Amino acid sequence: MTHVEEMLRTYPADLGDVDRAALVRCIEECFDCSQTCTACADACLSEAGVADLVKCVRTCLDCADICDATGRVLSRHTGYDANLTRAMLQACVTPLGKDAQGHADRPD
Amino acid sequence: MTHVEEMLRTYPADLGDVDRAALVRCIEECFDCSQTCTACADACLSEAGVADLVKCVRTCLDCADICDATGRVLSRHTGYDANLTRAMLQACVTPLGKDAQGHADRPD
Amino acid sequence: MTHVEEMLRTYPADLGDVDRAALVRCIEECFDCSQTCTACADACLSEAGVADLVKCVRTCLDCADICDATGRVLSRHTGYDANLTRAMLQACVTPLGKDAQGHADRPD
Amino acid sequence: MTHVEEMLRTYPADLGDVDRAALVRCIEECFDCSQTCTACADACLSEAGVADLVKCVRTCLDCADICDATGRVLSRHTGYDANLTRAMLQACVTPLGKDAQGHADRPD
């Protein structure tokens, strides 16, 4: 239902030896995840126990933004940079730490 | 392949008499269009005749951003506001004017 | 503190007779509003009475996304289109309707 | 001219021992960078030698998206997670690799 594969197939320059099926799926998942997390944050807001779900809302909002940015970066092939792609993919798979109070656990 | 329909089905509050199939398709199209336009702008950059495609690149970048914002607005149902939804959908279907030079045709 | 004005001054093509001071301010306000609304939605989540603020959270999230897209559109001058600019600005100033229950007030 | 500091000051919960001045500046720089890179990509499109600037356009588009997402993540304090913040900041400061042809240098 998406056009990710078609856009990749018609890209006018060389894509190198990238695994196209994996790339298509990764792009699709990024955009789908961005939508799902946006909808999940909103669904939490309509739950009777929203006060217990604020951490979930926040995580969903972050995830939506990060997957959106990653899906866009992955959709570009001109002037491709592996370091940047890797950094964004690593952000996507970052394991969340234990619940912190305030910013006590802020990175150094 | 997307989770739009599933997220809509599990939304915990009343959605009123909205046409769910139309809403699902509209959300899916917004996110797909955002990806396609991002990829199209990038493909133009790798064309030999990129100098002739700069208007296309710009339009694609705008379209990607507007569809992204619209897809997010449509994915939220809590505190739904018809005026805002309508305004964003109208932005999505705005017919582009004739090519303008610079900002001579700027809105009043 | 922003670079909006400097970027406009160094734009290499003709900007026509646009009111530059107004354009600079409008772009700055879009990005500032996007940040403020993102922070406001988050602040609501940390309020004791978050259950009474869910409509505010949703409105802030929409506003952040719409102002972000509008600020990006306004930051582009190549292949400028007045219709699209007008549509996004109108979305930004859309008066919210009275609180609707679910999607009963969905646009036609 | 921005409201970043004011929003941080009125945040209703504990922010821990975060360096507020640094946080304010970081958020402001993310949003400013997102605007500047959006404008820079557009300015490149209006340069006579746009064909030589496609790598710059692409890098600017990526940078705009990543700084946007990072500015949003940094603007949220509820349910703060240090790992995620660190991952996004690292993406922001990722040194670009040497120019790659196609995706030959794709991450493993």
Image (cartoon, coloured by chain):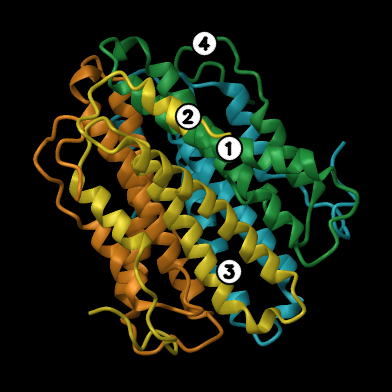
Chain colours: A orange, B cyan, C green, D yellow
- The reply to whether callout 3 and callout 4 are in contact (CB within 8 Å) is no
Residue holding disc 2: C37
Which chain does tag 2 point to? C
For marks 4 and 2, give the one nearer the viewer.
2
Q: Are marks 2 and 3 on the same chain?
A: no
Give the camera-side residue of C51 and C104: C51
Give the camera-side residue of A35 and C11: C11
Give residue C67's mark: 1
At label 4, counting other C-alpha atoms closer than 10 Å, the crowd grade (few under 14, some 14-19, many 20 or more) is few
Residue D30 locus on image (x, y percent): 45, 50
Q: Is residue C48 above or below residue A98?
A: above
Which chain does tag 4 point to? C
Question: Reading the chain from its start, which is encountered first: label 4 or label 1?
Answer: 1
Gap in Å between the C-alphas at discs 4 and 1? Answer: 22 Å
At label 3, counting other C-alpha atoms closer than 10 Å, the crowd grade (few under 14, some 14-19, many 20 or more) is many
**Picture residue at 51% right of the left edge, 50% below the top:** B29
B32 vs A92, left or right, is right
Secondary structure at numbered mark 2: helix
Give the camera-side residue of A9 and A87: A87
Residue holding disc 4: C99
Amino acid type of the residue tagged 1 in the rendering: Cys
Residue A52 locus on image (x, y percent): 18, 21
Residue holding disc 3: B40
Q: Is residue C57 visible?
A: yes
D20 vs B104, left or right, is left
Q: Quadrant of residue B37?
A: bottom right
Q: Is residue B2 visible?
A: no
- The reply to whether callout 1 and callout 2 are in contact (CB within 8 Å) is yes
Q: Which quarter of the rendered picture does the N terminus of chain D lie within? A: top right
Secondary structure at numbered mark 3: helix
Q: Is residue B104 above or below residue A26?
A: above
Secondary structure at numbered mark 1: helix
